[in-house]
Image (tube, rainbow, N blue to C red):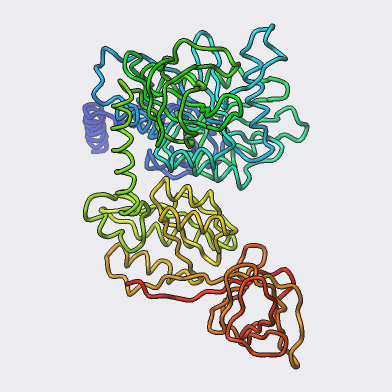
Amino acid sequence: MKIEESKSMETRSIAESKKTVAQAAPRVELPESMAVRDLAAVLGKSSIEVIKQLMRHGVMANINQIIDFETAASVSTSFGFEVVEKRKPKSRVAMQASRREKELLKGEGAEELQLRPPVVTILGHVDHGKTTLLDAIRRTNVTASEAGGITQHIGAYQVDVNGKKVTFLDTPGHEAFTAMRARGAQVTDIAVLVVAADDGVMPQTIEAIDHAKAAGVPIVVAVNKIDKPDAQPDRIKQQLVDHGLVIEEWGGEVICVLVSAKKGTGIPDLLENILVVAEVAELKANPNRSAVGTVIEAGMDKSKGPMATLLVKNGTLRPGEVVVVGETMGKVKALFDDRGKRLKEAGPATPVGILGLNQVPQAGDELLAVADEQEARRLLDLKLAAKQKAREAGKGVSLDNIFARINAGQMKEVGVILKADVQGSIQPIRDSLNKLSDEKVRVNVIHAGTGGITESDILLALASKAIVVGFNSRPEPGAKRLAELEGVDIRFYNIIYNLVDDMGKALKCVLEPTYAEVVEGHAEVRAVFGAGKSNKVAGSYIRDGKVSRSSGVRVMRGGKVVHEGRIASLKRFKEDVAEVATGFECGIGIEGFNDVQVSDILEFFRKERTS
């Protein structure tokens, strides 16, 4: 009986084995490298099981450690999976760059297109070595006779890397980078983010990351100052991951190069990697057409007249051609490179200085080469009419017109620039806004930071068609003026629920009547006086505008709002007054607030219904 049972079990075992062989093993696609936790998720196993299997293969790894393809494949095979290597897709930013190229080259014949040099902008925090890196790149790519005597005449130049050219824009930083985008000029193909190995990711680094991401530009990270004794490159890499930049060796798609701009270490490697990113983007242009370009910087020379540095994006520019640049025109008298050498022509992605314009253009203005002066004047008339129409229509996105734009198909994403008083407020607000996204439209926090709302925030909002939200944060005077000029919507909140509720209502077009805030003036607290047992009066000087007895008041300290309320008393000397104008001193009592301090800024405002 036992023999028969044994034979029966053996028969079933053979049948099951044949069935297993007959069925194809489950297939998984694995990338070049991945984290242990990600491998466990792909295999449908617990992290503990995967770690045990790694130990059997002689690999000691924790849940967050990155392992290579071969190691992940051997573990997967042990679990009965068939493994294939996942082809690395073209990155999102590379695809965006490709789309920009196609838009620029619309109507161009494929046979006329040729590869062009990439255009690179250096971004990063102050004192992290941006200028030193640019100087090191130039020194590496000039002949011995030129070294030591270089004079930079224009804010852009080209270097030669293994027989291929790379164009660098020497801009002041991400503010200028975004200001050009705000004017409709997308000239950068690659952004090099400089981070000091002895300092780490700083506020301006985060801003630069967010500005580059908003522009859809591929980022190459240069970890600088690795020669310093306190350099910690691995810490920098982890900080980059925390801000959404996962480097290649950790399974991401962001190239990271260790450099020392001071000693010249790693510069050739950085340049080679820039060329690799450029090859993926397949940057092309048609040199055999009329020139199209963008102004990088411009000014008035006492002896030469209006001068402009521009980047030729497509076509070829030559002396003697008539050009339209922004709201001015002229005939090109001369072209010269960054060393002052005269050029006979400038092809795609070539930076040049030009003479011959009638007026000084603005950075970001588009250049078009035309047939003659009559055509130039006709184009100028059309551009001025279009500009007037755009100004009347309003450029900025506002919370009031979001729903109409979504329904018209003009928006698939609502961008938000978020500034808060403290870091702890940012993540809850970001999470709450992300939950408002649905299949029709996505809410995207493009940039979030602490402190006052700056001009850089307004420029990013303008370039990205976003709304600025201040949570216990107020705009700097320059930022407020720029927002009003460009039609950028700024909303202020001190309760998270109200912020999220307003955004949700805007997406569903059920906003309550809206009230615009009108800032009436600002005062500086120069002395604090006692008034009674516990009350205090702020001896103040009205810096601009006026203060009225009926005004609302905010107390700002270090750019942050510490109190918002009403005015309890307003006096000139000992007399009660209804209002005080610019340039006068007065005593101001604030309802329910006795912590006013010298150097506080008082902002006076009123609310007006707009809809």
The quarter of the picture where the C terminus appears is bottom left
Res 103 → quadrant: top left
Residue at the bottom extreme of this rendering: 532
Q: Considering only vertical position in the picture, is 41 above or below 500? A: above
Relative vertical location of residue 21 with respect to residue 162 in this rendering, above or below = below
Q: Judge from the rendering whether residue 58 lies leftward or rightward of residue 108; answer left or right.
A: right
Q: In which quadrant of the rendered view does residue 142 lie?
A: top right
Above or below: residue 595 compared with residue 369: below
Question: Is 216 left, or right, of 121 in this rendering?
Answer: left
Give x and y (percent) for residue 38.
44, 40
Measured from the top left, where is residue 485 in percent x and y?
45, 55
Q: Residue at x 43, y 22 (%)?
A: 312
Q: Is residue 312 visible?
A: yes
Nearer to me, 360 or 71: 360
Task: Let me know if residue 56 appears in the view.
Answer: no
How many labels, in total?
Answer: 0
- Of residues 207 and 569, the one drawn nearer to the viewer in this rendering: 569
Residue 522 vs 574, above or below: the answer is above
* Residue 448 in the image, given as x and y percentages of width and height: 51, 53
Give the residue drawn at x 61%, y 13%.
Answer: 141
Location of residue 150 in the rendering, given as x and y in whole percent from the top left corner: 67, 17
Image quarter hosting the N terminus: top left
